Amino acid sequence: MSAPSAKPPRDAAQRGYNVYQQDCPARQMLDRLADKWSLLILTHLRTGPGRFNQLRRDIGGISQKALSQSLRKLERDGLVNREAFATVPVTVEYSLTALGLSLAVLVDPLAAWAEASIDTVLQAQRNYDQRHAPKPDTH
């Protein structure tokens, strides 16, 4: 099996973007997606709009601060829309933009792969750890 090509897709190359180049601005998007929470937020919002506390309850382990920061970054990137309603207290709802939805549909298969493959990955990790375990000192 040959290694994947580092050549960017044709339309990206025409615009001068290549994520393998250090100064490519598209790397910022990869950084955002590689963080701990962004993909989970995007896939959750694919099921429909959500309020802050609902997202916090549904995405296990995320802190209020991490959720707030992630939502703000995703909103800045144009992936999430934040809508405040004039209620007391103010109600805020988050939803995917068209751009966010175009990304979330790509993430769903990745999440499904992770769920389907985790047992195999965990076994591979155990095998690796056994092969690389420190040898007992025989002295």
Image: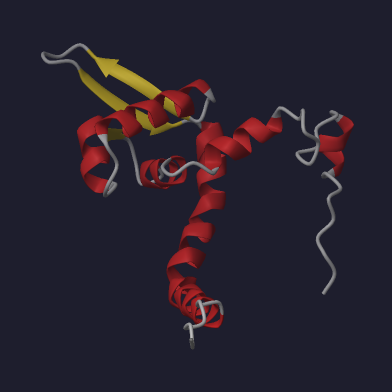
Depth order, front residue of 84/137: 137
Quarter of the rendering containing residue 55:
top left
Quadrant where the N terminus sits is: bottom right
Locate residue 70: give its quadrant.
top left
Q: Is residue 115 above or below residue 47?
A: below
Query: Total label count?
Result: 0
Residue drawn 52% across the image and 78% down it: 124
Q: Is residue 7 left or right of residue 69?
A: right
Tell me, what colour scheme is on the image?
Answer: secondary structure
Q: Nearer the viewer, residue 136 or 90?
A: 136
Q: In this view, does 24 lie above or below 110?
A: above
Measuring from the top left, give residue 25's x and y in whole percent. Answer: 71, 27
| Quadrant of the rendered image containing residue 37 | top left
Q: Is residue 71 left or right of residue 16?
A: left
Q: Please give the name of the residue rendered at 20% of the width and 11% of the height, measured from the top-left corner.
A: 86
User: Please, is residue 93 above or below residue 62 in the view?
Assistant: above
- Residue 129: x and y in percent read 50, 76
Q: Which residue lies furthest to the left in this view?
A: 88
Report the residue that reaches farthest toward the bottom.
Answer: 138
Q: Residue at x 56, y 42 (%)?
A: 103
On the image, the x and y values in percent for residue 36 come to 44, 44
Q: Where is residue 24 in the image (x, y as percent from the top left)?
A: 76, 30
Which of 99 and 127 lies nearest the eye of the viewer?
127
Q: Residue at x 53, y 58 (%)?
A: 110
